[in-house]
Image: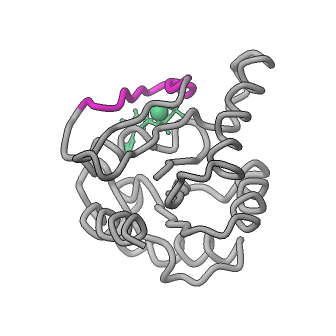
């Protein structure tokens, strides 16, 4: 199961929250932290794949190309992938790169789980509006998105259930 999303969206933090460990995947305040494909073995049954983020301007052109290839390899080709967790920051309107990712994901017939991240950064009353705005931008059903926070644990059990269900099929 591969985790994709723009740089700094919280991929590494979400993997840590899912496996219940603080520092299995390295996180950072500054974008561009994850620079390679890091694979975490969950009981020899499921592998969580932490990928570099897309959309961060301050890495070299060559690195950006390499990140792009790593990401696309999982999203567009990798046969062993059982699904993709696509992360979008609940606070932000989707970027051009997010729309590009939506097209790649749509072309691939496999389960896509959408995790809206950093929900602790918006008030509970704003959340429904943010969910509607983001899923509306992609023409997705609202119930396909799981509202999460790696900081508070919100939605982590739901997400884990969806990941395990996708992996079993
Ligand atoms: P790259 O590896 O650079 O692509 O980033 P990433 O998507 O792996 O993001 P990472 O998990 O490193 O998190 C980026 C920053 O956001 C870190 O400072 C995290 O502590 C913070 N962060 C991640 N998830 C949450 C969350 O749910 N709530 C809050 N408040 N902060 C979060
Ligand atoms: Mg990371």
Q: Main secondary structure of the magenta part?
A: loop
Left or right for 1, reference 150: right
Q: Residue drawn at (73%, 52%), measured in percent from left and top?
A: 95
Q: How many marks?
A: 0
**Coloured how?**
one colour
Q: Which one is in front, 92 or 11?
A: 11
Q: Residue at x 72, y 25 (%)?
A: 66
Q: Is residue 55 left or right of residue 164?
A: right
Quadrant for residue 24, please give it.
Answer: top left
Q: Position of residue 18 (x, y in %)?
A: 28, 51
> The C terminus is located in which quarter?
bottom left
User: Where does residue 160 sit, x and y in percent of width and height?
Assistant: 30, 63
Task: Residue at 54%, 25% (x, y): give it.
Answer: 36
Which region shows up in magenta? 23-35
Residue 27: image x %, image y %? 39, 29
Where residue 16 sits in the image (x, y, percent)? Answer: 29, 41
Q: Magenta stretch: residue 51 in it? A: no
Left or right, 162 with reference to 20:
right
């Amino acid at each position: 199961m591969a985790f994709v999303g723009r740089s700094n969206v919280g991929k590494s933090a979400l993997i840590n929250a899912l496996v219940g460990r603080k520092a299995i995947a390295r996180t950072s305040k500054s974008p561009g932290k994850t620079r390679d494909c890091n694979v975490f073995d969950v009981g020899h049954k499921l592998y969580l794949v932490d990928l570099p983020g897309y959309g961060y301007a301050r890495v070299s052109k060559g690195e950006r190309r390499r990140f792009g290839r790593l990401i696309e390899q999982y999203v567009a080709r990798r046969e062993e992938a059982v699904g993709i967790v696509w992360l979008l920051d609940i606070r932000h309107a989707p970027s051009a790169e997010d729309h590009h990712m939506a097209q790649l994901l749509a072309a691939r017939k496999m389960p896509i789980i959408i995790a809206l991240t950093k929900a602790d950064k918006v008030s509970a009353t704003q959340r429904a509006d943010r969910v509607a705005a983001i899923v509306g931008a992609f023409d997705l059903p609202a119930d396909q998105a799981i509202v999460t926070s790696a900081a508070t644990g919100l939605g982590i059990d739901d997400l884990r259930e969806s990941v395990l269900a996708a992996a079993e099929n």
